[in-house]
Image (cartoon, coloured by chain):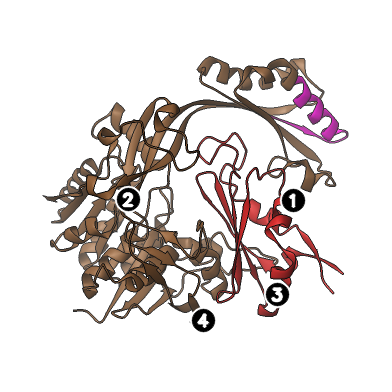
Chain colours: A brown, B red
Amino acid sequence: MKEKIRIGCGAGFSGDRLEPALILAEYGNLDYLVLECLAERTISLAQKRKKNDPNLGYDPLLERRIKGLLPFLIKNRIRLITNMGAANPKAGAQKIIEIAKSLNIPVKVAVVEGDDVFEKLTGNEFTLESGKLLEEYGDLVSANAYLGIDAIIPALKTDANIIITGRVADPSLFLAPLAYEFGWDINEPNLMGQGTMIGHLMECAGQITGGYFADPVSKPVPNMDTLGHPFVDVEANGNATISKVSGTGGLISSQTAKEQLLYEVIDPHAYLTPDVVADFSKVKIQEIGIDKISISGGLGKQAPDSLKVSVGYNAGYLGEGEISYAGANAKERAFLAGEIIEKRIGKLYDEFRIDYIGLSSLHGMELSKDSSPYEIRVRAVGKTFDKTLANLVGEEVEALYTNGPAGGGGARKNTQELMGVVSILMDRKKINPILTILES
Amino acid sequence: MKIKLANIAHGRAGDKGNTLLLSLIPFKPEDFSKLVNNVTAEKVKIHLKNQLQGEVKRYVLPELNAIQFTCFEALGTGVTTSIGMDTHGKSLSYALLEMEIEVG
């Protein structure tokens, strides 16, 4: 058994930068590299791509990432764990094999599936968000359960270089190699809680190294342009230190760690994952060097009997139009434009609103009423199930050129399909992880 | 004397479905009690009344020297279907820091 293992996190969302992952793989002395690439809605959008082409439905950047990383992974004997499989882990694995062959690199890929529970839905499940029945959401597109470490550990027991999954809980991507390498008992809740806390701090990559933290006035962070992603050194007892490759930009401090520790946490005393109900309230963070912190004190209670399932549904279309006004009376002309659009089409939509970008688009008039910008951009937006009607929002805004206030410029229009996501709980006994091995 | 939260604290906004999470962390440990005494769940609800439809729950975390506000029904119809500009409510961390509190 190893005394210490090092895990790097090279991506915190599907669109994350590639360069920090390459730096971790090349210079990080890693045992494991994790790429976390699945937000709530990402998998539903991937499901749509899979419907159009059964060979797609994995992360759109998978090819670029694997092409860049694979030589370093093999050379430096780093195992990759990633949820880039999204809606189609097997197709993602086949793509990895194809890339490996083209690079003449032998590789073994473990595919973890079983998160797709769409066929198991009845429609009579209660949604956690509204308490309404699932069937009231209309046209359902996808249903993916959050799998835990019990699904990933069997893949780690093989000699696969790469473990690719669909939906798994983000912290489980980190807890799984810890539990596997150190032989942690998955029924020991405090170890599961500590490992989950480590995973939660790591899972957003740059968000603990100064990304999404930097404020040049109150929270300056050096060299943001070369922001490094983190790695964590974990000992068999769960003690951990987080740091990054020296020479990369960014900052790791107790401040960056606290912001990330509480990020997206509904109850700091009870953070629910498939592996544990983790308690982050007693966590101790200590700065022990430059860009180096030690973290301890993650606790936990026994894992829940049911797993969260994200269900995607068609939520109609969103139509948008924007146009700008500047100079004398910009605010008044923008308000006039908004009033005109509202009167012309506002009543046609399920939801409709006008935003004044540069003035009140983010937080309403209350907090912004005293500001007086030189330029304002009017944004009209309407939601509807009728695509033609959605297009009308942008068309009407564009028509303000010749049918609206003076001096409008830079009109843009956009219509997008909306994919809604709600959650249900499903008995974990109904959900069976499946492991497949592919080789180049 | 009135001070703006932005001068003594920082924080990050996060989202889960239609629930908004806002952390509030003092720059100096000694300011923690000012935050605990002055920034109640009720005050946050009033301060962000244009955004928040539902209840606000406050978690005071003395070991971490931090406060977490869990705001229900906060993101229009939720991140994936909201028609707002900032569907995740990510910029709301700075809206909270606009709050002014009275300190002696």
Front tag of 4 and 3 = 3
Q: Position of residue A356 (x, y in %)?
A: 73, 36
Mark 3: which amino acid?
A: Ser
Mark 3 sits on what residue?
B33
Front tag of 1 and 2 = 2
What residue is shown at x 50% (from left), y 81% (from top)?
Answer: A286
Label 2: how many residues lie within 10 Å, few (<14), some (14-19) or many (20+)?
Answer: some
Check if mark 4 and mark 3 are on a common chain. no
Based on the picture, tell me whether residue A328 belongs to the magenta stretch.
yes
Say whether residue A123 is left or right of residue A436. right
Task: Please identify the quarter of the rendering in which residue A212 is found.
Answer: bottom right
Q: Position of residue A435 (x, y in %)?
A: 16, 51
Label 4: how many residues lie within 10 Å, few (<14), some (14-19) or many (20+)?
Answer: some
Tell which of A56 and A293 is nearer to you: A293
Mark 4 sits on what residue?
A287
Mark 1: which amino acid?
A: Ile
Mark 2 sits on what residue?
A306
Residue situated furthest bottom in the rendering: A288
Mark 1 sits on what residue?
B46
Q: Position of residue A299 (x, y in %)?
A: 40, 72
Task: Please identify the quarter of the rendering in which residue A138 is found.
Answer: top left
Mark 2: which amino acid?
A: Ser
> Which residues are drawn in magenta?
A322-340
Which sits earlier in the primary sequence, circle 2 or circle 4? 4
Front tag of 2 and 4 = 2
What residue is shown at x 57% (from left), y 41% (from top)?
Answer: B87
Contact (Cβ within 8 Å) of mark 1 with mark 2: no
What residue is shown at x 63% (from left), y 49% (from top)?
Answer: B55
Check if mark 2 and mark 4 are on a common chain. yes
Check if mark 4 and mark 1 are on a common chain. no
Based on the picture, tell me whether residue A388 belongs to the magenta stretch.
no
